[in-house]
Image (tube, grey):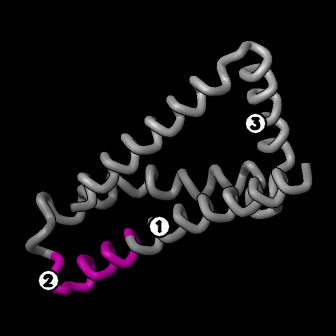
Amino acid sequence: ASCWRCLSLRYQWMCLMVASAAVILSLTRMGKLWFGDGTWEGTMLRGESCLLADLPVILGGPIGLLALGTHTGSRMLCKCHSLMLQGIEEAGFLDIWKRQSCFDVCVAVGLWAAAVT
């Protein structure tokens, strides 16, 4: 259980750092556009308004993670995950779940990479 708790804590902090980095990068991009950095203006489709529409989505990630207590190592997330895994294991779906989870992660990362490039 201690090893699982340590891995869970690292994962929660990693998610929080990635979400926070996305906020910082987006705010930097908005700041450069608003303060007249010409290199960013050519990449925008509709000017400043399209960045403002993304702001609630961008801020929702870190705020939600903080509300769940990921910065303190949320025990509730660990309990939810362990309860889910127990049910999956008892039903005999653990191998199928692992395969499907791996596939889902690969698809998500692939879509993210395609969107970024």
Which element type, helix, strand or loop, lies under badge 2? helix
Answer left or right for 12 relative to 100.
right
Q: Nearer the viewer, mark 3 or mark 1?
A: 3
- Residue ID at (62%, 56%): 63
Q: Secondary structure at mark 1?
A: helix
Q: Amino acid at mark 3?
A: His
- SS at circle 3: helix
- In the image, the segment drawn in magenta is 26-40
Q: Is residue 35 magenta?
A: yes
Residue 78: percent from left, percent from top: 81, 44
Is residue 2 rendered to the left or right of residue 49? right
Three-letter residue code for mark 1: Val
| Rendered position, 32 above or below 50 | below
Please name the residue shown 29% across and 60% down the image.
Answer: 51
- Few, some or many C-alpha atoms within 10 Å of disc 2 (few <14, some 14-19, many ≥20)? few
Residue linked to disc 3: 81
Contact between labelled residues 1 and 3, with CB atoms less than 8 Å apart: no
